[in-house]
Image: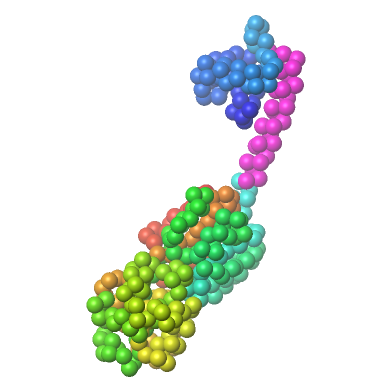
Amino acid sequence: MTIQQLEYIVALERYGHFLQAAEACGITQPTLSATIAKLEEELDTQIFDRSKHPITPTEAGLAVIEQAKTILQDVETMKELVLSEREKESGEVHLGVIPTISPYILPSFIKQIQTNYPSINLHITEAVPDAMIQALIKSEIDMAIMSPTDTAPDILEVPLYIEHFVAYVSPNDKLARQKELHQKDFPTSKIWLLNESLCMTEQLKNIMKIASDYSSLYRAGTVDTLIRIVEENGGYALIPELHMGLLRDYQRHNVRHIVTPNLKREVCLFVRKDFVKEKLLNIIVNSICRVIPEPMLMHNLKERYIRL
């Protein structure tokens, strides 16, 4: 039994004529007739007396049609509730963010939400990508901010921005004498990188593979740790571009831009496809857009309204 079948029997009861009912439903007469006949077969009862003109319901059919009207009204009520939820600018949002993104987004993002949308109750969790995907699948969170990764088919991916990586170089390292760097300049020792689980791009993973002298020593969990290691032990680290805003003046002198390859990562918002609060989703995306420098944002993201 389907909602469509219930709509068809209500229409036929209203018009008393197969052709008129079919036209009202936007289908052909044979389709309407076959669909109603299938419902009668499923219920093992005759809903309409086809020998009469106009066609009228049987006694049992009247009871079925009245129940169908009640169900259809409930369906309309449910649609209105969902529409109301879609347009809400209040409620709870459970958001996950990976550690290599959270320091650059969360402080200003939280302020944006609390200032402009005080009726939104944010619950923010920091976790690695694999844990975040599992939390999305289990409905423990509604959305997650991280780089693209393998996800379940019921998760929607919204591209947010592209971020480049730069090199943080010890002043005592020979790389410090260069104004910009190429991958051919990278030594395979004294390179300090983030833990592979923390949303590494394929480009960075390739660099890790050739840095065999490094990889067995230490893999940092935060960018701040990487920087402190470089300052104490020499060498260099690859850090996200947005981290430059958190550096002290003397530290900015240790940053070198990487010319080739153009190391970068894409950052996306992942959301469950059954998340119906469309307005809230767009508020979250727009609030992130206000935090990220405009040149880094995906093209036309600010003008785009995301539909669920």
Q: Main secondary structure of the magenta part?
A: helix
Quarter of the image containing the N terminus? top right
**Which residue is at 47% across, 83% downward?**
224
Question: Residue at left 74%, top 17%?
Answer: 60
On whether residue 53 falls in the magenta region, the answer is no
Is residue 12 found left or right of 107 in the rendered image?
A: right
- For residue 174, what is the image quadrant? bottom left
Start and end of the magenta stretch?
A: 56-82
**Residue 300 position within the rendered picture, expressed as x and y whole percent measured from the top left:** 39, 58
Where 240 sits versus 284, above or below? below
Horizontally, residue 165 falls left or right of residue 15, namely left
Q: Residue furthest top?
A: 51
Residue 244, visible in the rendered structure: no
Above-or-below relation of 240 to 149: below
Q: Measured along the vertical axis of the image, is residue 190 above or below residue 60?
A: below
**Residue 298, position in %: x, y?**
39, 61
Q: Residue 165 in the image: x percent, y percent? A: 36, 74
- Where does residue 209 sit, x and y in percent of width and height? 34, 72
The figure's colour scheme reads rainbow
- Any magenta on residue 77? yes
Q: How many marks?
A: 0
Indicate left or right for 163 with 50 as reference. left
Which residue is found at the position 36% from the left and 74% from the top?
208
Depth order, front residue of 127/215? 215
Residue 251 versus residue 107: which sits nearer the camera? 251
Left or right: 176, with 95 as reference point = left
Q: Is residue 248 visible?
A: yes
Residue plotted at (69% across, 28% down): 69
